[in-house]
Each structure stands twice: as C-alpha cells, then as structure tokens.
Amino acid sequence: MAPSMTTSSYAVLALLHLRPWTGYELTQQAQRSLRYAWPKSERLLYSEPKKLVELGYATTHKEMSGNRSRNLYTITAAGRRALNEWTSTRTQPPRFEIETMLRLLFADHGSREDVLRALDEFEADIGEHHQAIVELMASYLDGGHPFPQRTHLSVLFATFQIDMFKTIERWIEFARDEIDEWPTTRDLGMTPRTEALTRLLAQDQSPLTP
C-alpha cells in the first residue's frame, strides 16, 4: 500500500519546490523555517523525502560532495501538481501544546513556587524565540533572506509570531500578579477576584487589554 500524505509531507514538498536538497539539508531547513508553524521531530522530517520519492512526487540521485556521495532530492511535475492541489484543501484545526499550561491547570498538585517557576521557564523560552524572530527580520533588511522572492510571506508570518509572543509575555506578567495574591494553589474556588475575571471573559473581554 502506498504511503499517505500528511501535512508534514506537504511542508517538505513545498521546501523541495524551492530548490533541490539533500535529506540532511532538507531536515535542517524544515527545522529552521517550520518550527514555529509546524514543529516536528528531526526523525519524522528525515523520513518524508523517501515517502515523496515512493509516491512519485520527488526523485533522488547521488551527487558527489568531496570524496563522499549524497542523495539529492528534486520535486517532480506530479509533486508540483499535488502541492497546488493541497493549497485548496480544508486546513486542519489548530493544535496548541504548551506544557506550562498543563502545569497551571494542575498547579493544585504543587506549590505556588512550582507554578511560578514554570512561568519563569516559559518566559525565558518565549523570550528566546521572540528575540530570534526580531534578529531574523533585521537580517532581511540586510538582504539575508535565503529566498528573497518570498519575503512578503515570511514577514506576514513573522507579524503573527511577534504579536503572539508579545501577548504571551503580557499574559505571563498578568498570571504572576494573580498568583502572587493566592495564599495557596489549592481549593480557592470562586473568589471575588476570580468572579470579576470570569465576568470579563464571559463578555469576551480580556483583563490584559489596557
């Protein structure tokens, strides 16, 4: 039975549309360019080019690099058609996986210090990603985009990322202030403060909005 295409398969196929890559180059480029939109393990990404070859969406041939040979993958006409068809299909619903949110939801199994530490770690990780995007945008101004004809797409995506990171950073500060007022993480229930926040949210208003 022929392997089925996944969203990861199409993402790798789209990278092949840019230029031919070796399996290693393709995996590294996917980790760089897709990690904020479609983060996948290196092992999974490395298996995708072989699947595309089996489906006839890519070809592979050996290329010499110094004294070593390497497999170079190239998209086929069938692969281009499949990629074009994919862009018109229904997108998958978004999925968010943030361990800090799990730690918060089950913070009543630990201490205030535990959940505050999780927020600190979350802030450090988000700050690192945030700064990386800022520096990436600065590099584009110096001609650093590897595919300059696609800059308009990258910048629109970066706008989403920067706004998301800023919102998360504001929420972390808000969450810290709230937790600082808790005497414990356990059994606080519907306090007057919690009720006030709940009423705001029930009206589709955010306490983070100035």
Image (cartoon, rainbow, N blue to C red):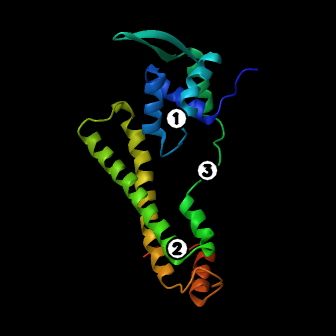
Mark 2 or 1: the one toward you:
1
Q: Earlier in the sequence, mark 2 or mark 1?
A: 1
Q: Earlier in the sequence, mark 3 or mark 1?
A: 1
x, y (%) of residue 187? 66, 83
Secondary-structure class at tag 3: loop
Secondary-structure class at tag 2: loop
The residue most toward the right is 1
Q: Nearer the viewer, residue 113 or 210?
A: 113
Left or right of residue 31, residue 196 in this image = right
Evaluate if marks 3 and 1 touch, with contact meaning CB atoms under 8 Å apart: no
x, y (%) of residue 122? 46, 61
Amino acid carrying label 1: it is Glu
Note whether 141 is above or below 171 in the view shown. Answer: above
Mark 2 or 3: the one toward you:
3
Q: Residues within 10 Å of mark 1 (few under 14, many from 20)?
A: few
As drawn, the label of residue 42 is: 1
Evaluate if marks 2 and 1 touch, with contact meaning CB atoms under 8 Å apart: no
Secondary-structure class at tag 1: helix
Q: Residue, x 58% and y 30% (percent of image)?
A: 10
Q: From the image, which quarter does the C terminus lie in?
A: bottom left
Q: Residues within 10 Å of mark 2 (few under 14, many from 20)?
A: few
As drawn, the label of residue 206 is: 2
The residue most toward the bottom is 192
* Residue 47 location, quadrant: top right
Left or right of residue 201, residue 35 in this image = left
As drawn, the label of residue 94 is: 3
Q: Residue, x 63% and y 85% (percent of image)?
A: 188
